[in-house]
Image (cartoon, rainbow, N blue to C red):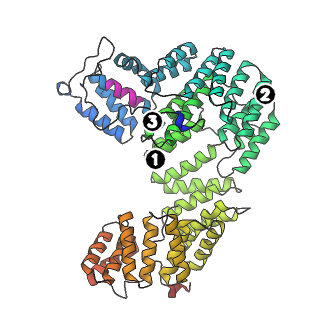
Amino acid sequence: MRRTHLALLSAASLLILPAVGNGQQAPQPGAKPPAQRAAPPLQATPVSAIPLGGRYLAARIGEQDHDYAAASDQADLALAMAPKDPELVSLAFRLRLFAGRFDQAVQLAPQVLALKPADGLAHLVLAVQSIKKGDYPAAEQQMGRIGGEIQLGPFREYVMAWLKAGEKDFAGARARLAKLKAAAGQSTGGPSLVIEGQIEEMAGDKAAAEARYRSAASLDKTGLRTIVAAAEGLRRLGKDDEARDLLKKYGEKYADAVVMDGLVGPNAPMPPAPSTAAGISDILFDMGGLLSADPRNQRTDLSLLFYQLAASLQPENDFAWLMIAGIYEQFQMVPKAIQSLSAIPARSPLYWQARLRTAALDAQEDKFDQAVSRLKELIAEKPDRIDAALTLADLLRSKEKYADAVEAYDTAIQRINHLEERHWTIFFGRGIVLERTRQWPKAEADMKKALELSPEQPHVLNYLGYSWVDQGLHLDEGMKMLKRATELRPDDGAITDSVGWAYYRLGQYDKAVEWLERAAEQKGDDPTIIEHLGDAYWHVGRKREARFQWERALNQNPDKDRISIIRDKLSSGLSASNDKPTVYEKAKQGG
């Protein structure tokens, strides 16, 4: 089967947050809160006594579906019916945060703390609110009340350093940072040096700040946030040419990911001065990032919560908005993803990426023509870039508009000045759509080019090897490719299927059955694999099982051009007329 679809500290330093409101067995409204709750206790109202059960259930379902805005609306309606119910207070507070309704969540934080005085999340929310107001001593007190359920680890010290800086206690801020440096064995990474530089800049020590920014950029040459923050600091300190050069070099090296025009152009605005709010927003963003990357965290919504807090504290945090959009896209909440991307300003190095993703998301919203139009505008706007053309090519391929996709891939490839290993995906993508448009010689050439650039790519080995064997071409070499692909991806059902189908095309049906049964175990919902298994069963005399597999394949949404063939097999069995290569007949292609 040849088809394929194309930090600040160690995560170990941040223990997992408790699964607030976790579980499908959450207590119903009216359940007694923990015994240690503060007096006077809130009075629970049994569900049976008031008509709020439906609202509560709708809120919980919305939460499970990640539709936090709708869930928050329902929780608020339920809370209005029973404003003193402990479970509803907790649920409404949590959902307001997940929905990005920070100011509304702040209103409920005191009630949450009346239920549970040590609730770390409520204290964190009130601390963020105090920071937004510029009341740094109050924020420091709230941070000190956060208990063990939120394991902030070293992040607490960074937050406290920023709060000391906000209070203009720069000696205290430096002491906090020195404590962190001592704990790390005197080693300091680029992001930490940026923080030191920003606090020194706030303190008025320009020489110290300048030295920290330069060191940060030197130590973390691949980190976009570090480079941007260091360059912005240097600009503020009057080192405009040095800052622009730093950004320009990064933009040229990582041109596929960022566009620095808004930062290096002649009319680029002076970046804002460092602030406690912006610094702590970055810390909250890092916490979200570590939670997202930590394999122990099974709940993406916890990451979303910290990204939301970061964006609430600093609405200009474009990195937070990009991550929020990515999570909403993962949750298939496309309008919310597009709304989040719209918050990224034109001066941001992420603005181009946001426009690309917005166009791609338009297609998911049944705005395909609008998406294509936007991408074509982006292609024309920057004739030296390949990413818009690639995005368009992949979009057209996903909609099975293969001829148009070929043209888009052609545009991308024509714009490549220096071929590198990473470009194998482009030739592979074009090879796929060329094969789908029955241009096998050209498709074969692109597959070979992809392997020339990156020889050990299992999906390319699988696709080319499968296509050869299926057409009866280069059988030995094709089988070697498929065997190598299975060594690289032994649990990939599509690749396992390819080996089984290769044995089938070679007439070794017993081996074919062995491999195809394994493929069906690995990927039993794939109609191509199931059809192949039925064909192999027929050849070894297991005809009743063959028909059962063909029936399964027919019920699993096979490609349109396979439906009539599978029905013919069910009606008449396997015959010369329906037992043909699944790529296409080589006699008609001269491959």
Decide which of tag 1 and tag 3 comes sooner along the chain. 3
Q: Is residue 200 magenta?
A: no
Horizontally, residue 40 falls left or right of residue 136, namely: left
Magenta: predominant secondary structure element?
A: helix
Left or right: residue 106 compared with residue 238: left
Q: CA distance from mark 2 to mark 3?
A: 37 Å
In front: 339, or 509? 509
- Report, in whole angstroms, how far the alpha carbon at label 1 lies from the one at label 3: 14 Å
Residue drawn where x is 35% and y is 40% of the image:
64
Residue 522, located in which quarter of the rendered image?
A: bottom left
Q: Is residue 558 visible in this depiction of the protein?
A: no
For residue 532, above or below residue 249: below
Q: Residue at x 29, y 36 (%)?
A: 58
The residue wearing badge 2 is 237
The amino acid beneath tag 3 is: Leu
Where does label 3 land, which residue?
302
- Of mark 2 and mark 1, the one earlier in the sequence is 2
Label 2 with label 1: CB-CB less than 8 Å: no
Could you tell me the amino acid type at mark 2? Leu
Give the class, few, some or many, for how many residues have Cα within 10 Å of label 2's Cα (few <14, many ≥20).
some
Task: State which region is magenta.
Answer: 88-96
